[in-house]
Image (cartoon, grey):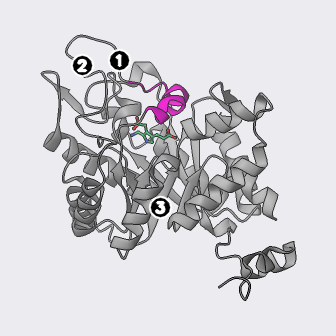
Amino acid sequence: MYPLRRNRRLRTNEAIRSLVRETIISPNDFLVPLFVVEGKGVKDEIPSMPNYFRYSLDLLEKEVKELWSLGLKSVLLFVKVPDNLKDNKGKEALNPNGLMQRAIKTVKNACPDMLVMTDVALDPYSAYGHDGIVENGMIVNDPTTNFLAEMSISHAKAGADFVAPSDMMDGRILTIREALEDEGFINTGIMSYSAKYASAFYGPFRDALDSAPVDMVDIPKDKKTYQMDYANRIEAIRETNMDIDEGADIVMVKPGLSYLDILRDIKNEVNVPVAVYQVSGEYAMIKAAAEKGWLNHDQVMMETTMAFKRAGADIIASYFSKDVVKLIS
Ligand code: PBG
């Protein structure tokens, strides 16, 4: 009770503040999303994601070596698929010599100990920009999960350590886990996007991969029949528990900043590692406000990163990974 307890004593200077700090950030916390494109010598800045790039395989190699030298040891790969290779069923995703498969090998050759996770969903391969197969104006669940299992096997064969299904179909974790077991990939892990909301914060990512749902008759305009309603909280726990029962090694909450309550709920509920994804729109907002001089970029970046860890994230997937690590080292 005051005046016996004056809380400000523990805030007097940086030395005491750092001594009593409850949450510490290190390079071990991060998962670095990387965008890969065809070509040579390509390092393409994404317009809605300033200072974030799509790399061709040769420059991807350089980038992962730099990440490794900074202490960043895990990447999450996304590919931008040329339009002429897109169709409804995403069959290019199974091409053993496809861009994703080559990207996995490129990273593993450049940095054999780098942990490679791969995005598993149809959208970059889908002519309609959906995470599943479209039939009669609907996203069909079970044919999609069977396809995602084949896609996961293909990534595992190419050398992926973890597959990361980001599609939100029902039962896909079980289907993928069983397929991996059947094929002998018993050590290939699954990081499930288990509580993934239908969010407008994914806009810049869809620019980066040119993967937004198309505007066509009989094609759903949004992802609300599979991604979660952002009004819901209990549902996130149900989704996450089901994915764990089906074999998810790591679960995820996505997006990040607007869902810190969900992140804490999940952290309190489950006993597997919990990841959070600070998504493209969150990155873009901070970049835009900083460009205008309205926010201090580095301070806001650190504050939001700390918020994820404080809210319970064991793993932070972030486009700021490199910048944060440079700042704290
Ligand atoms: C695709 C996928 C998306 C993101 C990750 N995987 C977009 C979507 O679901 O539409 C979003 C990542 C981001 O915005 O940074 N299944």
Quadrant position of ligand 1: top left
Q: Can residue 264 be found in the magenta stretch?
A: no
Residue 214: mark:
1
Q: Nearer the viewer, residue 31 or 177?
A: 31
Q: Position of residue 280 (x, y in %)?
A: 55, 38
> Circle 2 — which element?
loop
> Circle 1 — which element?
loop
- Asked if the residues shown at circle 1 and circle 3 are in contact, with their CB atoms under 8 angstroms apart, the answer is no
> Circle 3 — which element?
strand
Rendered view: 326 above or below 14:
above
In the rendered image, which residue does mark 3 sit on?
A: 275
The residue drawn where x is 65% and y is 61% is: 111
Q: Earlier in the sequence, mark 3 or mark 2?
A: 2
Q: Position of residue 321 (x, y in %)?
A: 67, 54
User: How many angstroms separate mark 1 from mark 3 (CA)?
Assistant: 30 Å
Magenta range: 200-212
The residue drawn where x is 22% and y is 32% is: 133
Q: Nearer the viewer, mark 3 or mark 2?
A: 3
Q: Can the viewer see residue 161?
A: no
- Asked if the residues shown at circle 1 and circle 2 are in contact, with their CB atoms under 8 angstroms apart, the answer is yes
Rendered view: 12 above or below 320:
below
Q: Amino acid at mark 3?
A: Ala
Q: Is residue 50 left or right of residue 94?
A: right
Residue 219: mark:
2
Q: Can the viewer see residue 310?
A: yes
User: How many angstroms separate mark 3 from mark 2 (CA)?
Assistant: 31 Å
User: How many angstroms separate mark 1 from mark 2 (CA)?
Assistant: 7 Å
